[in-house]
Image (cartoon, helix red, strand yellow):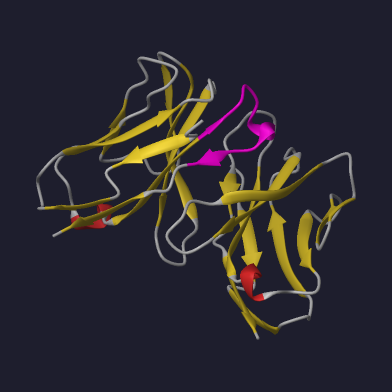
């Protein structure tokens, strides 16, 4: 099993461009999450999903969109990229219950210039 | 909502010494407290967790303690080794709400 796979690993965007960060998991987990990690700030939740067709906002959703059409995939869309979105983005998944522990992907490092 | 504070932000210890990282949380409904280790260039990995009906849990050199009355929990690493050097995150959750993470502690083990 590959676990949680994120692509791309690195990306440089110009201000105003758009892109989609891909995330796929092969563990048949119902719950999926997107966090961003800024230096010294820990991990902040952007969006999460409890199953296909269901998504909800986290602490910092502005400037992002998500969709969950299948159990496996949970892409994160950035529209009109801004320098404040420069960060490392982590996708994670967990079993039906949060308390089963998260499996994280290896992250996408995004720079907006 | 939940707020998790983590201290210290950086910690240096000599190889073989113990390291302690402390976290406090604000939501008395929180009942799940995991700890994650993040090595350079990688995603966080779960190393140990504790639930609210347990006061202490140990796994080899790692232990976690929980004080629900005071709303704090701690990670203890004994006999530290250079491979323990990493960033450690605590987190908290109530029921099935997403985890709220602390800001992390960068642990350096000096050989």
Task: Report x, y in % for residue A30.
Answer: 54, 21
Residue located 65% across and 68% down the image: B84
Residue located 42% across and 60% down the image: B41
Residue A55 drawn in magenta: no
Taking B29 as reference, is A2 left or right?
A: left
Q: Residue furthest front?
A: A1
Residue located 84% across and 49% down the image: B68
Please tell me in which quadrant of the rendered image residue A47 appears.
top left
Count of labels in the image: 0
Taking B62 as reference, is A21 left or right?
A: left
Q: Which residues are magenta?
A: A93-104
In-front residue for pair A3/B50: A3
Task: Report x, y in % for residue A40.
Answer: 46, 67
In-front residue for pair B80/A59: B80
Residue located 83% across and 41% down the image: B52
Residue A94 drawn in magenta: yes
Query: In this rendering, is residue B55 above or below B95?
Result: below
Q: Quadrant of the C terminus of chain B?
A: bottom right
Task: Report x, y in % for residue A105.
Answer: 45, 42
Query: In this rendering, is residue A30 above or below A35?
Result: above
In-front residue for pair B49/A56: B49
Task: Report x, y in % for residue A74.
Answer: 37, 27
Q: Quadrant of the N terminus of chain B?
A: top right
Please tell me in which quadrant of the rendered image residue A19 appears.
top left
Query: In this rendering, is residue B47 above or below A70?
Result: below
């Amino acid at each position: 099993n590959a676990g949680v796979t994120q692509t791309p690993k690195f990306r440089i965007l110009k201000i105003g461009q758009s892109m989609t960060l891909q995330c796929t998991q092969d563990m048949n987990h119902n719950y999926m999450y997107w966090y961003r990690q800024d230096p010294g700030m820990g991990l902040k939740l952007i969006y999460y999903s409890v199953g296909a067709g269901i998504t909800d906002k986290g602490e910092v959703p502005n400037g992002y969109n998500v969709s969950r059409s299948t159990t496996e995939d949970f892409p994160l869309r950035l529209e009109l990229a801004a320098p404040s979105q420069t960060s490392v983005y982590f996708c994670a998944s967990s079993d039906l219950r949060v308390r089963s522990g998260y499996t994280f992907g290896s992250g996408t490092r995004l720079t907006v210039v | 909502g939940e707020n998790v504070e983590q201290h210290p932000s950086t910690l240096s210890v000599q190889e073989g010494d113990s390291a302690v990282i402390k976290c406090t949380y604000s939501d008395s409904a929180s009942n799940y407290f995991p700890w994650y280790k993040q090595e350079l260039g990688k995603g966080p990995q779960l190393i140990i967790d504790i639930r609210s009906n347990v006061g202490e849990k140990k796994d080899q050199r790692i232990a976690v303690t929980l004080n629900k009355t005071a709303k704090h929990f701690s990670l203890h690493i004994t006999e530290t080794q250079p491979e323990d050097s990493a960033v450690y995150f605590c987190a908290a959750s109530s029921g099935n709400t997403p985890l709220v993470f602390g800001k992390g502690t960068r642990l350096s083990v000096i050989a």
